[in-house]
Image (cartoon, rainbow, N blue to C red):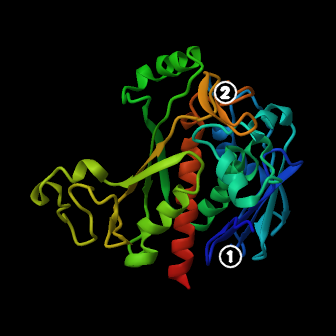
Amino acid sequence: MWHNSFGSKFRIEIWGASHTPEIGVRIAGVPQGIALTEADFEADLSRRRASAKGTTARHEKDIPTIISGVANGVTTGETIEIVFQNGDTHSADYSQFESHNRPSHIDFVARAKYGSEVDLRGSGQFSGRMTVLLVAAGVVAKRVVEGVEYNTSIVEIGGSRNTAEFPAIIEAAMHDCDSVGGVVECCAKGVKVGLGEPFFDSAESIIAHLLFSVPAVKGVEFGSGFEGVRLRGSERNDRFVDGEGHTASNNEGGINGGITNGNDIVVRVAIKPTPSIAREQMTYNRELGEVAPLCIKGRHDACIVLRAAVVVESVVAIALAELKLTMDN
């Protein structure tokens, strides 16, 4: 049985798959009276579209259709449903993976868990294609949590933090029929004090939960993260500089004890290299009963991180909407 929903107060459910005729997201818990039109989605959706060198040759229009929950340009308080059409699909490209599972991909575990009839065309429900629904939900979430400013950027690709080197690194990977990963940093400014609970519903827990639901995410850190553990407490501590909770540094990433402290939330996300690569790999073939060479065909990103920044930002916004509505109620 699929479990494709999240949230208690800001509830989202995604449906469809990479190569079904359409995919959609339902969003419940959105208050009445929030201005929202289909045009409001374009800015963030355009950030996710494949266009830069190193992104997939699959080009979907990503035009949202609001089915319910909005009337006359404002939310009604009912469940919002948004649908996208899938048009540019090449399902035949995926037939080779039925017996020859891709390394580091979902093919093997999907069939082991859901059976041989699971739809893995375009990687099915596990595909990065489904992140367009997270971006759509993020647009709505940003309207729910007003006053927050997001600054999201790619801070590392292929082991380099020099942005001038990024194009050459991606080009080299493409030349070698390979892929590269990277790191996205999201900063949310203007988050109010008091969101989150200690332990199981901490702000970090909710944000990280959603970030790890994004395909290809393999690591999450807040504030100074792993670098911070190499410091002494006297070096890492965030000293308060006023009565509003502002601090001289932000090694905590805007969260103390699971609760937002009013400083910027800073989170970095590790995105692994795309596992679908054209370079030959030796991996087990079930049909042959032996390890055999696999050359993956089809249209795949050489650097998925190029399209992941807005997805990271969107799920942070979804988490903040869940935290805000929980606090308000």
Please tell me which residue lies in front, 68 or 26. 26
Given the current orientation, which residue lies at the most extreme bottom position?
Answer: 329
Q: Residue at x 53, y 20 (%)?
A: 173
Q: Is residue 285 above or below residue 115?
A: above
Which numbered disc, 1 or 2, marks the residue that appears first in the sequence?
1
Residue type at numbered disc 1: Gly
Q: Is residue 182 above or below residue 270?
A: above
- Residue 29 image label: 1
Q: Is residue 223 above or below residue 216?
A: below
Please tell me which residue lies in front, 172 or 146. 172
Res. 57 image quadrant: top right
Q: Please tell me how crowded label 1 is: few (under 14), some (14-19), or many (20+) other residues with Cα within 10 Å.
A: some
Query: Can you tell which of label 1 and label 2 is closer to the viewer?
Result: 2
Q: Residue at x 69, y 53 (%)?
A: 110
Does any portion of residue 136 appear in the rendered image? no
Q: Secondary structure at mark 2?
A: strand
Q: Please tell me how crowded label 2 is: few (under 14), some (14-19), or many (20+) other residues with Cα within 10 Å.
A: many
- Residue 294 image label: 2
Q: Residue at x 81, y 55 (%)?
A: 16
How far apart are the two marked residues, 1 and 2, measured between alpha carbons?
Answer: 46 Å
Q: Secondary structure at mark 1?
A: loop
